[in-house]
Amino acid sequence: MTKRVLPVIAAGLALGVSAWSLASAEGRIDADERVSAILPPPTRPAVWEPSAGFQAFSFGGQAALGVAVFGLACARLRRRAR
Amino acid sequence: MHISEGSLPLTHAAAWTCASAPFLAHSISKLKTLRESRYLLAASAGYLFTLTALKLPSVAGSSSHPTGVALGTVLAGPAAMPALSLIVLLFQALLTAHGGLTTLGANVFSLGVAGPWATWLLWRLAARCGLGDQPAIILATALGSLATYACTSLQLALAHPDPSGGVTAAFLKFAAVFSVTQLPVATLEAAFTVVVLRMVVNAGGVRIAGLEAWAQL
């Protein structure tokens, strides 16, 4: 069990931190933001606008969650194949 | 490809939601029938979750994320993807302010319908033309990723046509902005998807229609 879960946790943390770091990096403009900049201003204000720090953290959390789900699914597939 | 909140008129947002609804309903019913391959679906969802969270640096000081739909399209079929895309897009709209709630239908259409179907059709077409498994998937993934962004460009062009050139000029303008950033990202995603797909097929000993040879490796 630990042998299966530990690498998944490690990979999840590594990719989560990478996604967090990439999302919070400054100096690069996201393609969606580039397109939004040439659009007319939004007709409605955003219902909820989290801070940039929270957004970056959420991107990290999303990546970590994705890796965890992917890793555990692969572990189950491997076990079932055996 | 995330159209942000308020960027589409309400009528367009509603129309794209209506366009996505049948695909979504079919996808949810399809997921129920795919219970046997739930681990493949989970792996596809995890891959989609991870890749759409990675804002990769690209050319000309820009960044963008891969679409991540190709793995699920090959493993579970394009019909399964709208439901998985909805989960990801809802998560991002609520927690990362990437996309929006009123534009959810439009975003599901581009990420969950246009991208996966384009990937699947190109994969099958390339395979039928005699291209090997690996090149066929690389080509389909890269072009499928670009098709997602082409769909977003069309959605935006229909909502905000160019005053002089109309929808076509607006589409070309949006597509040009996306393509500069997305071409390198789509190429990288295509190569990575083949590696991950091979890993999943080998790990699970699963047999995928069109990739029977891979499971025997």
Image (spheres, rainbow, N blue to C red):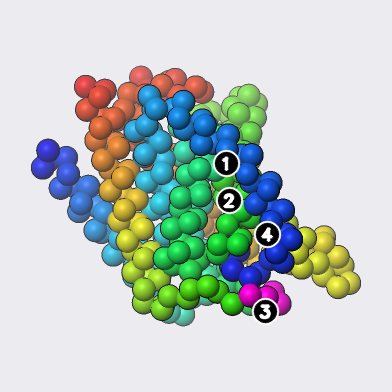
Task: Provide the residue designation for mark 2.
Answer: B108
Task: Please give left or right for residue A10 compared with residue B210 in the image.
Answer: left
What SS does tag 1 mark?
helix
| Distance of label 2 from label 1 (alpha carbons) | 9 Å
Q: Chain of mark 1?
A: B
Q: CA distance from mark 1 to mark 3?
A: 30 Å
Residue type beneath disc 2: Val
Structural distance between the alpha carbons of marks 2 and 3: 23 Å
Give the residue at mark 3.
Answer: A41
User: What amino acid does circle 4 point to?
Assistant: Ala
**B162 within the magenta span:** no
Q: Residues within 10 Å of mark 2 (few under 14, many from 20)?
A: many
Find the distance from the CA under tag 3 to the CA under tag 4: 16 Å
Residue at the spot 54% in from the left edge and 36% down from the top edge: B27
Earlier-in-chain disc, 2 versus 4: 4
Mark 3 vs mark 4: give the one in front: 4
Q: Which residues are magenta?
A: A39-44
Left or right of A20? Residue A33 is: right
Q: Main secondary structure of the magenta part?
A: loop
Residue B184 in which image quadrant: bottom right
For disc 4, the neighbor class at 10 Å (few under 14, some 14 to 19, many from 20) is: many
Residue B149 pos. (x, y %)? 63, 55
The residue where tag 1 is placed is: B24
Q: Are marks 2 and 3 on the same chain?
A: no
Left or right: residue B17 compared with residue B63: right
Q: CA distance from mark 2 to mark 4?
A: 11 Å
CB under 8 Å between discs 2 and 1: yes
- The numbered mark at residue A14 is none
